[in-house]
Image: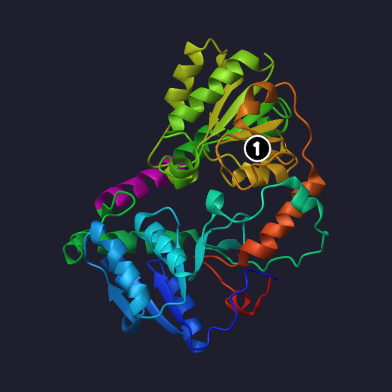
Amino acid sequence: MNLNKIGSVKNRNILFLQGPMGQFFKNLEKMFLAKDANTFRIGLNVGDYFYALKHSYVPYRGTPDAWPDFIMAFLQEHNIEMIMLFGDCRYYQATAIYAAKNLGLEVFVFEEGYIRPDYITMERYGVNDYSLIPKEAQFYEQIDLLELTKPRSTESSTLKRQVSAITYYLLADFMSWRYPNYKHHRDLNAVLEFYLGWRSAFRKIIYAYKERGLLHKIKTTYANNYFFVPLQTHNDFQILQHSYYRSVETFIEDVLVSFSQHALTENMLVFKHHPVDRGRKDYSDFICQKAKELGIDMKRILVVHDVHLPTLLKNAIGTITINSTVGLSSLHHNTPTVAMGNAIYGFQGLSYGAEDLDVFWKDREPVNQELYLRFRQYLIVNTQINGSFYGKFFLDDVVESTD
């Protein structure tokens, strides 16, 4: 499978910055060391230290204000040629990318896969709205469609993800005195995370009971008569950085207002919570309250939590999201999609924008499947790696691929 070309790493100086919670960056660093690279790993808390190779580990205990000068000096002092990091919107990572660009260095950003399952994303300099991939239909219309190899199963483990997160938060929180100036991009509270994890597990059981029979109704009674609204996590950088929304509630209200004024009276709205927010947020009361204020018949509103996502997408007449990768899945299932924020698939011909929402309820064109398939192929070839942060990862694909 073709990916972003990295080329030979022999004798190259490579910096790994923080990384996803768990062993992923540690294993990736081992691979580069085996290919005779010189590696460094900067960590910002004890969780980073725990999941790092100790011989290459460099702790940063300075203040956030001092970080820009530190990272610039580090890159120059060690003749760094390439940076690998996870998440391009976090302060420390974004600052490192800025410094690297000024020095003309390569940066590879990892994120969860645009195409799921069995892929993760790796792009030069940025992902999502910071991605360098073209956003014009004309570009993709010139691409020849190929028969891509089916990805190998990564056997991604939810348990492994959870254990990695719990371990990371416990160490980073309870030993925060080792890095007293560190500012995490989210709440760094191990006790709170444990409680939220427990509440999520409990709610999952409750929702399974409450939502029994709903899947059948989605495929029969409600099929082809509802618009689907997948909610993103409340603190998603995709929302905070790549849209004008500053809360999920504001997005929900915009959708409800437009629906109340422009949708056909026989159509429904189905909202689905993000599973990551299961223990943190429940927007059910907010949605129902706003719908009542707008005079919407409550028989037209359905709020779900754990109903099978592909089934919801297949049976919807349209999907409205901010910029979630669920939008790509929606297009894959031939369901017209509105992206209210900045999305990699948010260009004319493939999806609709926020300015189209009022019309979208009554007037939608079918998904241009040929354009979607060309776009999807380009994403896989140029930005996706067959692997998982918490499962199998086919490491050789990273280095041996070409553009």
Q: Quadrant of residue 65?
A: bottom left
Q: Magenta residues, as a range?
A: 191-204
Does 41 appear above or below 132? below
What secondary structure is the stretch in magenta mostly built from? Answer: helix
Residue under the point 53% across and 52% down? 130
Question: Is any part of residue 52 visible from this angle?
Answer: no
In this view of the protein, which residue sits in the foreground, 131 or 26? 131
Question: Is any part of residue 63 visible from this angle?
Answer: yes
Q: Position of residue 237 (x, y in %)?
A: 44, 46
In this view of the protein, which residue sits in the foreground, 126 or 157? 126
Q: Quadrant of residue 74?
A: bottom left
Does 102 appear above or below 185? below
Q: Is residue 160 left or right of residue 316?
A: left
Q: Quadrant of residue 260?
A: top right
The residue that disc 1 covers is 312
Q: Is residue 247 left or right of residue 192?
A: right
Instruction: Look at the image and say whether residue 176 sits in the magenta stretch.
Output: no
Question: Dividing the image into 4 quarters, which one contains the C terminus?
Answer: bottom right
